[in-house]
Structure formats: structure tokens, C-alpha cells
Image: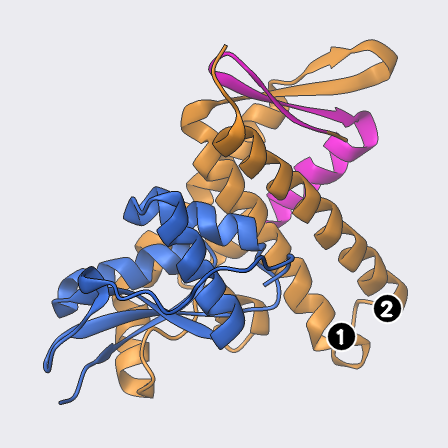
Chain colours: A orange, B blue
């Protein structure tokens, strides 16, 4: 990955083909979480769902009521962000050395920043659960998750810098 | 939060964040995963705070574990809390008791 760079009204991310494939797969997986919440099929006791939809109130009943009233819209909004990422990733151009150039319009930067954040939260929460609390994930899997959390942190931080610090041409 | 803190005076009096009895406040809580620069970006973008204020509140969250980012009516604070959740931040609202 090369850091994000501004090109006029778009922000550009250059990835290896493998990185682009991985990111596309992550986006697709996190979409499934929000689809499940939107469709009322999510397990709110799952630490990932609980972290993505945290308590708004100290009081359990008020927190539950708040979640009941807001979860659908919340999930739809965050699903749209993952969709925007998927759309921009799918529209990539292949440049030299089979590297991939992803162009993100300025209007989608918010979706990318929050969307990357959601993917980081999902992976981080799985890592924080520890290997003994997963039936399907090994310690090696979780170490890889942590590496991806850090990699996405670099991607997110570099996008913040490009959009906040970047001057228009 | 993940990142390296710089020195900023956290104890600035801010009229817009002062709450009186019966008001509701929005509190953002520290978490181990969100980047400091991202949290500052969210405060700037969503609340429209200038860079200095956004950074000061982000550092309050980072240093004190929480910061009051808004005060006022309940419905408005619920919208803010929902928006913060949408950005992946931990946020709650509570009533200010006299």
C-alpha cells in the first residue's frame, strides 16, 4: 500500500492486487454483519455486534429501547458505507506491476473512513475475545487479524492526513 | 485510542459545553482501537469544531477516559450519540442532576 494521495477532487489509494482482494473480502464480510442487524437476525450478545451497537444509556432498559429505535437506520447507514467502499474497489484501475489504483470521490471519504473503522472494530473485537473463545479461529488467525487491524489503521490514518492536510491543486 | 498525544491544555472553559440542571450531555468514551487522528476528524466533521477544539476534546477522551462533547436537549443528544456510534465511537448520554 502507498499512502493516500489527493488527485483533484478524488483521493487515490494504491494497493497490490492481493491487498485489494483482501480488502474487498473484508468489506463483504462486514457487510454481512450489518445485513443481519438490519434484518433483525443478528445476535446482540455477540461481542462484535455489541461493540458496533454500544449502549447509549447507563440504564439497561433505556439502552435497549434506544437500540430498538435506532439499530435499523444505524445498520443501513453503515451498510451503505461498506457498499460505497465495495463500489470504489470494484471500479479500480490496474496500473503498472499489477498494482491497483482505487479512486475515491471526496464525497465518499467519510464512508471510507468510517467503513475502515468498522472493519477495524470487527477484527479488533475478535482478537480481544482471545483464542479460547472461538470455535473457528486459531491463535494464528487472530495474529493475522491484528496485523490487518494495524494495516487498516495505517490506511485510515493516511486518508485522514490526505483529506485534512491536503491542499487542492 | 491509538496514537501519540501531544501537550494541549485540557482545562479550557467552554461555554458551549457547559450544562445546567436538567440538560442532557453527550459523552464520548475512550476505546482501545480508534485512532486519535480519526476521532479528531469525526469531531471536526460531525460537530463542526475547529481543529484546536476537536483536538482538545479528543485528548480529553484519551487522557481522562471520557469527554463531554455536547450539551442540551435530550433528543438532540440522542442524535449525537447515534451519530458517534455510526462512526464507531463509544458514546452515551446522561441527564445533568443539580
| Disc 2 secondary structure class | loop
Position of A102 compared to A132: left or right?
left
**Part of the protein shown in magenta:** A3-30
Q: Which residue lies under the disc numbered 2?
A: A138
For the point 26% across and 76% down, the residue is: A65
Q: Are marks 2 and 1 on the same chain?
A: yes
For the point 34% across and 84% down, the residue is: A58
Whether label 2 touches label 1, CB < 8 Å: yes
Position of A13 compared to B13: left or right?
right
The x, y position of residue A167, in whole percent, is 49, 20
User: Which quarter of the image is occupied by the N terminus of chain B?
Assistant: bottom right
The x, y position of residue A48, in whole percent, is 57, 67
Judging from the image, mark 2 belongs to the subunit labelled A
Q: Quadrant of residue A131?
A: bottom right
Q: Which residue lies under the disc numbered 1?
A: A134
The crowd level at tag 1 (other Cα within 10 Å; few <14, some 14-19, many 20+) is few
Of residue B94 and residue A123, the one placed in the foreground of this image is B94
- Indicate whether residue A4 is drawn in magenta: yes
Q: Quadrant of residue B94?
A: bottom left
Does residue A42 appear in this view? no
User: Which quarter of the image is occupied by the C terminus of chain B?
Assistant: bottom left
Judging from the image, mark 1 belongs to the subunit labelled A
Cα distance between the residues tagged 2 and 1: 8 Å
Position of B95 compared to B8: left or right?
left
For the point 23% across and 58% down, the residue is: B79
Amino acid at each position: 500500500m502507498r499512502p493516500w494521495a489527493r488527485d483533484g477532487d478524488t483521493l487515490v489509494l494504491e494497493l497490490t492486487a492481493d491487498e485489494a482482494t483482501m480488502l474487498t473480502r473484508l468489506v463483504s464480510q462486514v457487510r454481512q454483519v450489518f445485513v443481519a442487524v438490519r434484518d433483525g437476525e443478528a445476535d446482540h450478545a455477540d461481542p462484535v455486534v455489541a461493540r458496533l451497537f454500544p449502549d447509549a444509556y447507563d440504564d439497561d432498559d433505556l439502552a435497549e429501547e434506544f437500540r430498538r429505535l435506532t439499530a435499523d437506520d444505524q445498520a443501513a447507514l453503515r451498510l451503505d458505507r461498506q457498499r460505497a467502499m465495495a463500489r470504489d474497489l470494484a471500479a479500480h484501475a490496474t496500473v503498472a506491476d499489477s498494482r491497483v489504483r482505487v479512486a475515491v470521490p471526496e464525497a465518499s471519504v467519510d464512508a471510507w473512513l468510517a467503513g475502515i473503522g468498522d472493519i477495524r472494530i470487527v477484527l479488533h473485537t475478535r482478537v480481544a475475545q482471545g483464542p479460547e473463545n472461538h470455535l473457528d479461529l486459531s491463535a494464528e488467525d487472530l495474529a493475522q487479524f491484528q496485523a490487518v487491524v494495524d494495516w487498516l489503521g495505517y490506511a485510515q490514518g493516511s486518508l485522514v492526513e490526505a483529506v485534512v492536510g491536503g491542499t487542492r491543486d | 485510542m491509538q496514537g501519540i498525544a501531544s501537550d494541549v491544555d485540557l482545562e479550557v472553559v467552554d461555554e458551549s459545553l457547559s450544562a445546567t440542571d436538567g440538560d442532557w450531555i453527550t459523552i464520548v468514551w475512550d476505546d482501545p482501537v480508534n485512532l486519535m487522528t480519526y476521532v479528531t476528524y469525526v469531531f471536526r466533521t460531525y460537530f463542526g469544531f475547529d481543529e484546536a477544539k476537536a483536538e482538545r476534546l479528543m485528548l480529553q477522551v484519551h487522557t481522562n477516559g471520557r469527554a463531554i462533547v455536547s450539551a442540551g436537549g435530550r433528543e438532540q443528544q440522542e442524535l449525537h450519540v447515534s451519530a458517534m456510534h455510526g462512526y464507531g465511537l463509544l458514546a452515551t448520554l446522561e441527564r445533568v442532576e443539580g
